Amino acid sequence: KVRIKTILEQGERMVDKNVTIRGWVRSIRDQKKFAFLVVNDGSCLSGLQVFVESTLQSYEKVKSLLTGSSVSVSGKLVHSIGRGQQYELQADDVHIYGTCDASYPLQKKRHSFEYLRRIAHLRPRTNTFGAVMRVRSMLAFATHCFFQENGFVYIHSPIITASDCEGAGEMFRVLTEPAKSLNNSGKEGTREFFGVPTFLTVSGQLSAEAYSCALRDVYTFGPAFRAEYSNTTRHLSEFWMVEPEMAFADLQADMTNAESYVKFVIRYVLEKCKEDMDFFDRFIENGLTSRLHNYVEKPFIRISYTEAIEILKKSGKSFQFPVNWGEDLATEHERYLAEEYFDHPVFVFNYPAGIKAFYMRNNDHDSGKTVAAMDLLVPRIGELIGGSEREERLEVLEQKLHELGLEAENYWWYLDLRRFGSVPHAGYGLGFERLVQFVTGMENIRDVIPFPRFPGSAEF
Ligand code: 4AD
Ligand code: MG
């Protein structure tokens, strides 16, 4: 009862051996005296061809199976004389678990990604989504390998929180259903279960900072939630974020770690998911794997925000959004820099303080006009990573909160980290779905997460 992937990997060693596979029928060809089924169990892209002779007891039932049926097949693995596959299974016994009728929404033909989004519960049975999810899983594994091998401690940061890490007010409220009041609150009918307003976290950074100011190098890897009405191919309301935080690190060290991490996971999947990556290269984005090889071989580019603005101004392009020092870069600007100008991942650092979050460290060299922040922009995607040195000086941080109209009281414990043994530290957040898009060539972020959440959609 081995996985099909294992059989194909072991190849010659399995020939003439008896094996049992289980999976779903991808296609069936009835040739009267015999039939061919292709069965896949999702362990690999291709599946295994099964040869069924009419002498088999259950032949009549087997040959009338339709795409999508689930079966178990036992038999001998042999060399296939047909073209297209090296091996096939000569069935001695076929057991049918569940049949499938012609209303099965995944008939053997190419379906649009839009159509497949409407059947998000069945789309993992397609080649593309099987491959995306295997690569996604490997990227997650590689993420843990990278940080664990480099001595980082994995921290589980809370999902329900009272603090707005980004200070952008794009949070989902957490309420109980039905309304429950706290016994001691005296407020009848309030649904404030925790006694204070709580939200789904937008980022695990603040928790990671607390732990980094004790364990040095830590990372979180969990879901983040943003109630922003961005109906784009790069935004989700629920996404996953990898957030390393390093004590005693500055912005250069932050960028160096981010570059090593991204290169590590790309190399990892190119090696471990070769079949799937070749599939993306052929069917999703031509030349993908050689471009990825190129990205990991050369150093990522590093330019300041001020230099980026100069490049954009000189580009002669008519952008939809104006390019002015002090304003945030729009996706079109980010993509111009990474895709057209450099054609390579590029770090942009030292952003104007006015467009960045309260926790970013003011740069001394220009009296806090800019902050020690960085974004990693990559071709096709734009922003993949956002990070910074953290403001570790108590008075400066209090002043920043004040300027942004944020209540210092709400951040009392965060300020404690600056009161008691404060140290310079830095970190970043990588949008995991954007990484999956970058590595697979998938165009829409809704197609790289099992069940996407975006405005107006949480059906599955
Ligand atoms: O730039 P962001 O907002 O930074 C933070 O949240 C920091 N607290 C991270 C840190 O320093 N620890 O988000 C980080 C990354 C972005 O670069 C982007 O890749 C991704 O998270 N991201 C999203 N991905 C999908 N859908 C959304 N709505 C996203 N918002 C951010
Ligand atoms: Mg950002």
Image: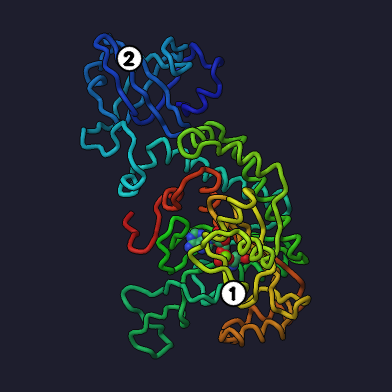
Label 1 sits on a secondary structure element that is helix
Please determine whether, in this image, residue 140 is positioned above or below residue 180: above
Q: Does any portion of residue 397 appear in the rendered image?
A: yes
Above or below, 436 relative to 127:
below
Q: Amino acid at mark 1?
A: Ile
Q: Pinpoint residue 15: horizontal percent, then vertical percent.
A: 51, 13
Residue 18, percent from left and from top: 45, 16
- Look at the picture and state if 13 lies above or below 268: above
Q: Is residue 221 left or right of residue 254?
A: left
**Nearer mark to the viewer, of 1 and 2:** 1
Where does label 1 land, which residue?
355
Q: Amino acid at mark 2?
A: Val
Figure quadrant of the N terminus: top left
Question: Foreground residue, 172 or 186?
Answer: 172
Q: Residues within 10 Å of mark 1 (few under 14, many from 20)?
A: few
In-front residue for pair 383/305: 305
* Residue positioned 44% across, 18% down in the render: 84
